[in-house]
Image (cartoon, rainbow, N blue to C red):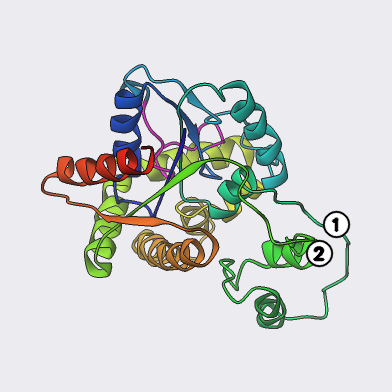
């Protein structure tokens, strides 16, 4: 049995994954593109060692900050794990939709074709990409990702089909509640030492690709480089996190058959029991 837990930041995905793993004696595989990197801890809300409660976690902290790691790499790595642990329950948890889809579907990538986009503005590249995928989740200001998308097009030769028996679980909440939780989470990250974490990484590695694009890291680096005040950087992290959450909902609703459950922040056990009830019904 494979259980895939998705949703935006701050809705309880990690907490639910631990509870389900304990019940079903499952392993947990990371489905977040930034959490594969070592040392990116506070800004990615990475689970702490003591929070794992002895449950095996995979595809966390497998790459160095200066390394490159693509969705194709993730697909190869996770397929090895899905085969190795095919006889026991597996829980995938994360918010990077393309990573999860590449893992669970017969997702094939078209060959990379390098084109010169120097004469195009970011807005023009974004519109070109949107014509390929109306549900595109790339920031229009992220030129590198837009160019990579247009070069590879992240298209498949056929409509991908699900390869495994998967229970898709999505955690959600009211939009205003979510945005408040995201804002509070960013404030906690700052209190927990996010600025110091980014400063250490920036001094150690410079402006690597992952630090240049990961929310929470790129904004603080802009603060170090004088583009923002610290207060402006924090506001940008909150804004970008909220926008990303909105894009995540759009992507998952259009790309996967997600069964959504409301997060009860006052009594999370109610959310957990609703999910268990659904899983037990689906496995009969």
Horizontal side, residue 11 vs residue 157: left or right: left
Location of residue 182 in the rendering, given as x and y in whole percent from the top left corner: 30, 57
How many marks overall? 2
The front one of 114 and 283 is 283
For the residues labelled 1 and 2, say whether their Cβ atoms are less than 8 Å apart: yes
Location of residue 77 in the rendering, given as x and y in whole percent from the top left corner: 67, 32
Determine if the magenta segment contains residue 41.
yes
Determine if the magenta segment contains residue 191.
no
Location of residue 53 in the rendering, given as x and y in whole percent from the top left corner: 31, 20
Location of residue 54 in the rendering, given as x and y in whole percent from the top left corner: 36, 16
The quadrant holding residue 115 is bottom right
Looking at the image, residue 94 lies above or below residue 78: below
Q: Which circle's residue, 1 or 2, is located before the other in the chain?
A: 1
Q: Residue at x 17, y 43 (%)?
A: 268
Q: Residue at x 47, y 68 (%)?
A: 250
Quadrant location, the C terminus: top left
Q: Residue at x 56, y 47 (%)?
A: 100
Q: What whole-number distance in Å separates the C-alpha atoms at marks 1 and 2? A: 6 Å
Q: Which residues are magenta?
A: 36-48
Identify residue for label 1: 112
SS at circle 2: helix
Identify residue for label 2: 151
Q: Residue at x 56, y 45 (%)?
A: 33
Tell me if mark 2 has few (under 14), some (14-19) or many (20+) residues whose alpha carbon lies within 10 angstroms of its own. Answer: some
For residue 207, say whether it is visible: no
């Amino acid at each position: 049995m494979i259980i895939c837990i998705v949703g935006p930041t701050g809705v309880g995905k990690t907490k639910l994954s631990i509870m389900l793993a304990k019940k079903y004696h499952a392993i947990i595989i990371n489905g977040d593109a930034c959490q594969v990197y070592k040392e990116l801890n506070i800004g990615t809300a990475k689970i702490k060692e003591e929070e794992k409660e002895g449950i095996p976690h995979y595809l966390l902290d497998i790459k160095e900050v200066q390394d490159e790691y693509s969705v194709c790499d993730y697909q190869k790595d996770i397929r090895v794990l899905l085969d190795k642990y095919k006889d026991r329950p597996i829980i995938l948890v994360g918010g990077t939709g393309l990573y999860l889809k590449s893992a669970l579907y017969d997702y094939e990538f078209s060959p990379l074709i390098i084109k010169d986009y120097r004469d195009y503005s970011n807005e023009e590249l974004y519109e070109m990409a949107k014509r390929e995928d109306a549900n595109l989740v790339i920031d229009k200001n992220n030129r590198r990702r837009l160019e990579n998308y247009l070069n590879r097009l992240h298209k498949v030769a056929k409509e991908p089909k699900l390869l495994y028996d998967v229970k898709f679980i999505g955690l959600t909440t009211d939009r205003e509640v979510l945005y408040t939780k995201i804002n509070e989470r960013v404030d906690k990250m700052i209190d927990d030492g996010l600025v110091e974490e980014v400063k250490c990484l920036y001094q150690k590695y410079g402006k690597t690709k992952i630090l240049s694009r990961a929310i929470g890291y790129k904004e603080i680096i802009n603060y170090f480089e004088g583009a923002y005040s610290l207060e402006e950087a924090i506001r940008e992290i909150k804004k970008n996190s909220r926008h990303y959450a909105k894009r995540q909902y759009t992507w998952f609703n259009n790309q996967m058959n997600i069964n959504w459950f409301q997060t009860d922040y006052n009594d999370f056990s109610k959310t957990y029991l609703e999910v268990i009830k659904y899983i037990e019904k689906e496995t009969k």
